[in-house]
Amino acid sequence: MAYPADLKYTKEHEWIKVEGDTGIIGITDHAQKALGDIVFVELPKPGATLTQGKSLGTVESVKAVSDIYAPASGTVTEVNQELNTAPEKVNADPHGAWMLKVKLSNPGEVKNLLSAADYEKFVAEEDGH
Amino acid sequence: MNRKIKKATTHVIQNEGLIFEKSSPGKKGYKLPELDVPEVNPSQVLGNAARADLGNMPEVSEIEIIRHFTRISTWNYGVDTGLYPLGSCTMKYNPRINEIVARLDGLANAHPYQPEKVSQGALLILQALRKALMEICGMEAITLQPAAGAHGELTGILLVRAYLQSQGNPRKKILIPDSAHGTNPATAAIAGYEVENLKSNAHGMVDIPSLEAQMNEDVAALMVTNPNTVGLFEQEIHKVAEIVHRKGGLVYMDGANMNALVGKVRPGDFGIDVMHLNLHKTFSTPHGGGGPGSGPVACKKIMEPFLPIPVVVTKKDGTLGFDYDRPQSIGRVRAFYGNFGMHVRALAYIMANGRDGLVQTTEDAVLNANYIRKKLDGVYELPYSTPSMHEVVFSDHKQTAKGIKTGDIAKRLIDYGFHPYTVSFPMIVHGALMIEPTESESLEEMDLFIDAMKNIAEECENTPEVVLSAPHTTRIGRLDETRAARQPILRWKPQAQSAKGD
C-alpha cells in the first residue's frame, strides 16, 4: 500500500493529517500489518489533552496490546466511535480509519515528523532487521 | 498416516458435553441419612438471605461426574505427557518428591493461625527457604509473601518507592527495555510511576548510550530481565547498574529467567538491588492451572525495613516467630505468609538437588536450549548471533515467503504431538518462535522435537497448505481467534442449548 503524501508519519507508526489547526490521527498500514487482526481500540475521550510522543491509548490485536503515541500535542475534539464496534476497519483501511480529531496546540510540531517517502524508507530499514 | 509424525498418532477420545448439559432434575449422587434433629425453615432464620432457587446447578450421578472429568482430563497436554517448550514460561518437570513432602500431615494440615509454638517446623521451612534463596540471589533480605511473578514485581517496585520516599523523593519514572515482559510496564504504572521505554541495541541487549541519555534524577528504577526475553545474558549488566546507581536510581531484576543463572552467577553481585523469583518456574513448583504460583522478592539491606509484614525472625529464646512490629513496612501483600505449600515444594527441590545438583540443572537447561539452537539454525532464522542461555528465539523470516507465520508453524507442531512454543513474543523479534526446553528433557525427546520442526520447515516449502490449515489431528480444528476476541461469548447460558448451531 502506498503511503499518502498528504499525511505525516511517526517512527512509532502513527499518521496525522493536518487541516488548519485540526489534526486527524490514525495508525499506519505497516502498524496494522505488524499487529495482525485488530480486536480492540482504546482511545481517550473528547477534551483529553495529548502530548507529542506520549501514549494516547492502546490498540489490541490477537498478538499483543500496543501503545498509540500522539504524533502532535493538542486537545481531543472527536473520537471515531465506529471503531468501538468495528475495529477491523483499521486493518481494512488504515489510512482512512481515523481514530481521533485533535485541536493542535502547537501545529509547528508536525514539522518533526516524517514525510511519506521518509517513512517508507524507515519501514524498509526496520523490516530488513 | 503421515509417517514423519513419530510422536503422535490418532486415538479414540470420547466426546464430552458440558456438565450442565448432562443435568436432569432430581438426579443425585448422594443419599442422606434420615433427619434426626428438628427441621428448621431457612427463610424463618435467614429472612431474605435464604435462597430457594439455587440457580442452574448440575444434577448428575457420581459415575457421571467421574467420567465427565476423567474424559476431559484425557484431552489434556502437560509436562507429564511431553515436552512443553513455551519460552519464558519455564515449564519444567515438577518432581514427585515435592508432592510427597507437601502432603506430609503436619504440613498439609497446618493452620495459619495455630500458635507459633506448634508451628516451629513450618517456620523453620520458611526460614531455610529464605536463607537458600538469599544465598542463590546474593541478596540480604527477602519476603516469601507474593503470590506469583507479577505480584512480586509490584512488591519489589513498592519497596523501591518506599526506600526512595524515605530518602526524600520517590521520583517519577521507571525505565523498561523494549524486550521486557508485559507485566513490567503494568507493574510500574500500578505503583504510580510513568513508564519510559528503553530501546535494545542490534545484539538484543540494553543500549548503553540510550540508557545514559535517559537516566536522570527523575528515574526511580530500571526494570531489567536477565537473561533477557530473547534468552541473552546482558553482558554489560555491571555497567548498566553503575549508570543507574550513579544517578541515585535502583535496579530491579525480573527473575523469570533465573533458571539460567542459579549456582553460576548472583544478581546481587552484578549490581541488582531488588528482584523477584518465580518458584513455579526456576524452583519446579507447579505452573499454570496446577499452581498457585509463588513470587518471593529478594533485596539488598537498604530495603529490608520496608519488607511486607510479617517477617520470620528468631526470638530471644531461640524459637522462631513472626515479627509484625515493623513501622516502615509497605504492609501486607498477601494473606498469611504467602503460598506456603509452594515454599515447601521449592525447598524440597533445592534440598533434593543440593548445590551441585542446582548447578548441573542450570548447565543442562542452557545446554538443551543451545542443542536445539544448533540443530535448527539454518532451518529457521536466528535474529541474533549472541549465544543463547536457557531459551532460544528464532524468527519465521524464511517461512513468510510462503505466507506462513510463526502461529501456523505452532499449530502444525500440535499435529506432531507437541505443545507449541511461545508465539510472537518477544515483540522485538518479528514473527518470533521462542523455545525453552528446560533441563527436564532427554536427548531423545529433544530429537523428536527437532525432527518435527525440520519436517514442518519442509512442509512450509513443499506443501504450505498443510501448515496453513493445521492442526488436522486435534478434536477441534483451527479456531477463529480473531472472531473469538472481537465477539467473545464469556459464559454458557441455558438458552444457548436450545439455540445450538447458532
Image (spheres, helix red, strand yellow):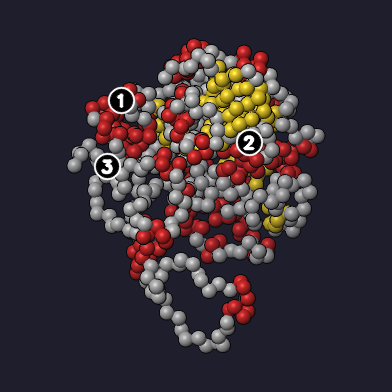
> How far, Cα to Cα, is label 2 from label 1?
42 Å
Chain for numbered disc 1: B
Which residue is pictured at 42% across the width and 44% down the height?
B484
In the rendered image, which quarter contains the N terminus of chain B? top left
Q: Secondary structure at mark 3?
A: loop
Q: Is residue A15 left or right of residue B313?
A: left
Q: Residue at x 36, y 36 (%)?
A: B410
Q: Is residue A4 above or below residue B66?
A: above
| Amino acid type at mark 2 | Lys
Percent across and percent down for residue B120 are 64, 60
The foreground one among A22 and B438 is A22
* Mark 3: amino acid: His
In which image quadrant can residue A69 be found? top right
At numbered mark 2, what does the secondary structure look like: helix, strand or loop?
loop
Q: Are marks 3 and 2 in contact (CB under 8 Å)?
A: no
Alpha-carbon neighbours of circle 1 within 10 Å: few (<14), some, or many (≥20)? some
Amino acid at pointer 1: Lys
Measure how far apart labels 3 and 2 are at the Cα level: 45 Å
Residue annotated with mark 3: B472
Same subunit, tags 3 and 2: no
Where does the image place residue B63, in percent across and percent down from the top left?
34, 69
- Give the Cα separation between the discs numbered 1 and 3: 19 Å
Q: Residues within 10 Å of mark 3 (few under 14, many from 20)?
A: some
Residues marked 2 and 1 touching at CB (< 8 Å): no
Mark 3 or 2: the one toward you: 2
The residue carrying pointer 2 sits among few (fewer than 14), some (14 to 19) or many (20 or more) residues within 10 Å by Cα, namely: few
> Residue under circle 1?
B402
In-front residue for pair B414/B267: B414
Looking at the image, can residue A37 be seen?
Answer: yes
* Spot occupied by residue B458 in the image (x, y as percentages of width and height): 26, 28
Residue labelled with disc 2: A45
Q: Is residue B402 above or below residue B149?
A: above
